Each structure stands twice: as structure tokens, then as C-alpha cells.
Image (cartoon, grey):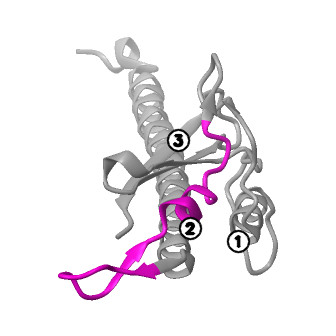
């Protein structure tokens, strides 16, 4: 083939190669952004799990216990004292719309405040408020259900983590 008919073919091949390379780079950038979002979501879920575990541990450690009657030896949870740890027990029409009275226990109030207040020592959860929920059901073996809600930055959906524990 004469050389004058192949003019510009190399330029066309180079442009196609650059286009393919550019799409590859854009794909890698998009993958990195997705990885960062997934890491942030995992961080928030871990923090929510830590907050829920913290309050359950505090309730178990601080609830009043009475000495059991014979034949059992040991102590039994005072159900009235356990019920005082309940916080925002009602539900609204939307996700994480809790209603009802706040707990009278100082450690629950402090915990609910910390859930939404970010500081150097407290990571907190983005978009969280003190509207967290603790439901105590003494009829079901002192079941404690803790629900922690938050809204991640640049996210439209509310997220929640629920922990169920039994205090005995």
C-alpha cells in the first residue's frame, strides 16, 4: 500500500488508546470513591454498635438488685429500677421518630446527649440527635432493646442499629 493512504492512522490509534486509558482511570477513581463510602458506613455502624453496647453495659452494671429469696442464692434485678432506664419508648410514623418520655436516669441522658455531640474524645454519629431509644420489657426476661439512629453525610436515608440484650 502506498504510504500516502495511511496518513493519520497512527494518530487515530493513539486517540483510541488514550480514550480507553481515560475510561480505565475514571473506573479506578469511581472504585476508590465507592471504597471510601463503604469504609465510612462501616465506621458509623461500628460506632453505633459501640454506643448501644456501652449503654447496655452501663445499665447492667448500675441497675439496682435485690437479694433473692430462698432456695436461690444471689441477687435479682429490681424490675422497677430497670424500667427507669427506658428512654423514648414510643414510635412515630417514620423511621427513628421516637416519642415518649426521656429516662430519668442521668447515665441514660448523658449517653443520649453523647450520641449526637462530636468532640475530641467522642466520635459520635453524624446526623444523630439525643432521640435514641431504649425499650425495657420486664415481662420478657428483662429484655432491653437499644436503637441508635444516625444519618451519614451526603446520605438521604436514616440508618439504625438495634441491639437486644437481657439483664439478669
Dot placed on the residue nearer the N-terminal end, 1 or 2: 2
Residue position for label 1: 107
Q: Callout 1 environment at 10 Å: few (<14), some (14 to 19), or many (20+)? A: some
Q: Position of residue 82 (x, y in %)?
A: 53, 62
Q: Could you tell me which residue is drawn at 31 percent across and 55 percent down? A: 141
Which of 19 and 76 lies nearest the eye of the viewer? 76
**What numbered label is drawn on residue 160?**
3
Q: Residue furthest front?
A: 70
Observer-nearest of 49 and 85: 85
Residue 147 image position (x, y, % from top left) = 53, 46
**Quarter assignment of residue 64:** bottom right
| Residue 88 in view, yes or no | yes
Q: Is residue 148 magenta?
A: no
- Residue 21 is left or right of residue 112, and the answer is left
Q: If the image is split into quadrants, where does the C terminus sit? A: bottom left
Decide: is 93 above or below 156. Answer: above
| Disc 1 to disc 2, C-alpha distance | 8 Å
Q: Nearer the viewer, mark 3 or mark 2?
A: 2
Part of the protein shown in magenta: 66-89
Task: Indicate whether 30 appears above or below 6.
Answer: below
Residue 63, above or below 84: below
Question: What residue is drawn where x is 81% and y is 62%?
Answer: 117
Residue matched to label 2:
55
Mark positioned earlier in the residue sequence (1 or 3): 1
Farthest residue, direction left: 71
State yes or no: discs 1 and 3 in contact (Cβ < 8 Å). no
Q: Are marks 1 and 2 in contact (CB under 8 Å)?
A: yes
Amino acid at each position: 500500500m502506498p504510504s500516502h493512504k495511511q496518513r493519520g492512522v497512527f494518530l487515530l490509534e493513539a486517540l483510541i488508546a488514550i480514550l480507553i486509558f481515560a475510561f480505565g482511570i475514571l473506573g479506578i477513581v469511581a472504585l476508590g470513591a465507592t471504597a471510601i463510602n463503604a469504609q465510612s458506613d462501616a465506621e458509623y455502624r461500628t460506632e453505633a454498635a459501640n454506643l448501644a453496647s456501652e449503654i447496655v453495659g452501663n445499665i447492667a452494671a448500675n441497675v439496682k438488685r435485690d437479694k433473692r429469696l430462698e432456695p436461690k442464692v444471689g441477687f435479682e434485678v429490681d424490675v422497677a429500677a430497670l424500667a427507669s432506664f427506658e428512654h423514648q419508648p414510643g414510635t412515630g410514623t417514620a423511621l427513628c421518630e421516637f416519642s415518649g418520655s426521656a429516662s430519668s436516669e442521668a447515665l441514660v441522658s448523658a449517653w443520649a446527649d453523647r450520641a449526637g455531640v462530636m468532640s475530641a474524645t467522642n466520635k459520635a454519629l453524624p446526623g444523630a440527635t439525643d432521640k435514641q431509644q431504649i425499650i425495657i420489657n420486664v415481662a420478657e426476661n428483662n429484655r432491653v432493646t437499644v436503637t441508635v439512629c444516625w444519618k451519614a453525610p451526603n446520605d438521604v436515608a436514616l440508618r439504625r442499629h438495634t441491639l437486644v440484650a437481657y439483664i439478669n
